[in-house]
Image (cartoon, helix red, strand yellow):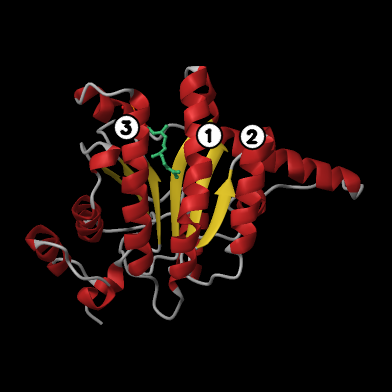
Amino acid sequence: MKITDLLKPANREEAQLLEKLDPKRLPKHIAIIMDGNGRWAQRRHLPRVAGHRAGMKATRDVVETCSRLRLSCLTLYAFSLENWRRPHAEVNFLMRLLREYVKRELESLQENNIRLLFIGRSTELPAEVRKDMQDAIQQTSANTGMKLIVALNYGGRAEITDAINVIIRTADANGITHFQVDEQMISDHLYTAGLPDPDLLIRTSGEMRVSNFLLWQIAYAEIYITEALWPDFSRARLFEALVEFQKRERRYGGLSESPAHGASEEVTERRFRSVRG
Ligand code: FPP
């Protein structure tokens, strides 16, 4: 299969980048810290909210492109626990924009067979936001293509804390006093339980931070940081990230990127993980 069987380049730049990509070595799960909406607006002497609106357009293109590339998961950091510290008006706008996104994109999600999921402390979100989230989750629940996971009111440390509290409560309820937590048990109680870990973490706008995003899950992810601001993160910028990903050698703490002979990639990955210091 050629990559152009999956999507057609829109211009010469895209064609040149796509030519460099091996369709068999694409990441299965990309996680993105969408940063730089405010700066994008500032540079144009526009209000910050105009940057968020432009960011929504970039989001739409990236979601559709990743789905065409047959990724298994795409996780987007839309609103962090820390984002409540922003001015009231901006937080309200972001909540409205998220509701608008969920409603407006539903048709396109269905057409592209994308299943929408959310991670984060959703119980702390306004009731009307929760209602729209639930509707979209329900309506896309039978879709079998890419999973689009939107991190909303999300924090990585909060996620690990929540997981541990659930484990303790479950043990308590079952009268278990002496138990030992292992890595698999923690993974199984994270908001992302059952989903593969990201292979590639992209952050836009040049900041060298992970900002409390998927702290547990990115243990072995390749990190790619681009200077492009989120509203400027076009398909070509995504292809550049994929080209760079394919240049990296993934070792999982071992010596070679290839899984051990005879073992499935997933099993081998887990084995490397458990022997790593
Ligand atoms: C970061 O830019 C962006 C956000 C906090 C919000 C992300 C929201 C969107 C991209 C809108 C649509 C997305 C979805 C999934 C509906 P910033 O404000 O931190 O930018 P700055 O660092 O330049 O100030």
Q: Amino acid at mark 3?
A: Gly
| Location of residue 23 by image quarter | bottom left
Residue 277 image position (x, y, % from top left): 47, 47
Residue 239 image position (x, y, % from top left): 22, 57
The residue that mark 2 highlights is: 125
Whichever of callouts 3 and 2 sits on the residue coming sooner in the sequence is 3
The residue that mark 3 highlights is: 51
Q: Are marks 3 and 2 in contact (CB under 8 Å)?
A: no
Residue drawn at point x = 20 percent, y = 26 percent:
44
Q: Amino acid at mark 1?
A: Met
- Beta carbon at label 3 within 8 Å of ligand 1: yes
Left or right of residue 175, residue 247 in this image: left
Give 214 or 75, whichever is nearer the viewer: 75
Q: Is residue 94 above or below residue 189?
A: above
Q: Is residue 178 visible?
A: no
**Dot 1, crowdedness within 10 Å: few (<14), some or many (≥20)?**
some
Residue drawn at point x = 68 percent, y = 43 percent:
163
Q: Is residue 179 above or below residue 245?
A: above
The residue that mark 1 highlights is: 95
Residue 244 image position (x, y, % from top left): 20, 54
